[in-house]
Image (cartoon, grey):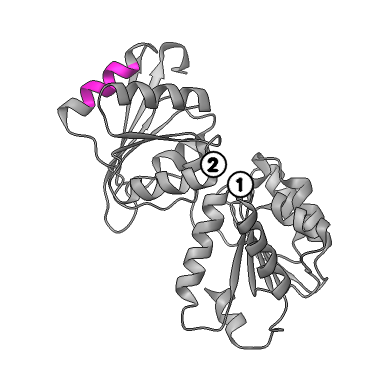
Amino acid sequence: MPLINELSKGNHPGDAVNAVIMAPTRELAQQINQQIEGFTYFVPVSAVAVYGGTDGIAWEQQKRGLEIGADIVIAIPGRLLSHLKLGTVDLSKVSFFVLDEADRMLDMGFYDDIMQIQKQLPETCQTIMFSATMPPKIRTLAKTILKNPEEVKIAISRPPESIMQTAYICYDPQKIKILEDLFLQSRPQRVIIFSSSKMKVKELASTLKRMKFNVAAMHSDLEQSQREEVMKEFKNGKIDILVATDVVSRGIDINDIKLVVNFDIPHDPEDYVHHIGRTARGTGGEGLAITFISIEEQA
């Protein structure tokens, strides 16, 4: 919001890229773009989202937006780098460089891409970094790219009190049966099940389909258009259960998620917090989180 406010004052060039927002996933880039479109409806500020997994037409649209000089560019690091190499984008007049979900971007191996992009920015550019966690590698990144930074801590990363957290200690083969029992007790609505790999997500989704549950899978093997369709149907309530990898665990804001199931234990505490944080969003919402823990994972 402050970024849009600054750009709306008319003190920045109208034919240049004035702000770059980096995001780790296509979904988050699209979501930020949609929010900006909404907020700038009556404001002369333009934006373009730049991400991969699209067809030639989308690439041309992105390229045109960059060449004309959209005020705000929301981009995945790799795809923006492609445009830089092709000379279809000029970042020499950028005033604001924003890294969203910085911890996630480093986890996904975008460090070198970010540094290459940052080298194209003018000295006067203000850099702003958002991160849910501050591990050592993020502090190192902050020291490298921020100038005299002001650190703002909004909250420690922990789940909202309104989430009821429960765990089932079980053997792997029992997990499906427990899910079936849960869903027979009360019809599943707005449920996300997180699993540790694409393979497991596909298997679990097809098993639940065979049980006649209304389910869809979300993972990185899907085409961009397929992902968008799945998210749209889940938001609209046409799909009751979404089985997903980490692709949807961060930054995707869907209200009214009733239940989150960690079919496998997340790799680290932060992932756990992000997974279960998909529920109880919005005002006064309550949610239930269930984690399956196999015998050897109890510690």
Residue at the image position 64 percent from the left and 49 percent from the top: 52
Secondary structure under badge 2? loop
Whether residue 157 is visible here, answered yes or no, is no
Residue 288 rendering spot, x and y as whole percentages: 29, 38
Comparing 194 with 47, the one in front is: 47
Separation of disc 2 and disc 1 at Cα?
6 Å
Horizontal side of residue 266 vs 106, given as left or right: left
Asked if 139 appears above or below 35 in the picture, the reply is above
Residue at the image position 61 percent from the left and 45 percent from the top: 104
Residue tagged by mark 2?
223
Q: Residues within 10 Å of mark 1 (few under 14, many from 20)?
A: few
Earlier residue among tags 2 and 1: 1
Comparing 81 with 260, the one in front is: 81
Taken as a whole, is the magenta stretch helix, strand or loop?
helix
Asked if 137 appears above or below 99 in the picture, the reply is above
Residue 243 rendering spot, x and y as whole percentages: 40, 33
Residue 109 numbered mark, or none: none
Horizontal side of residue 279 vs 132, given as left or right: left
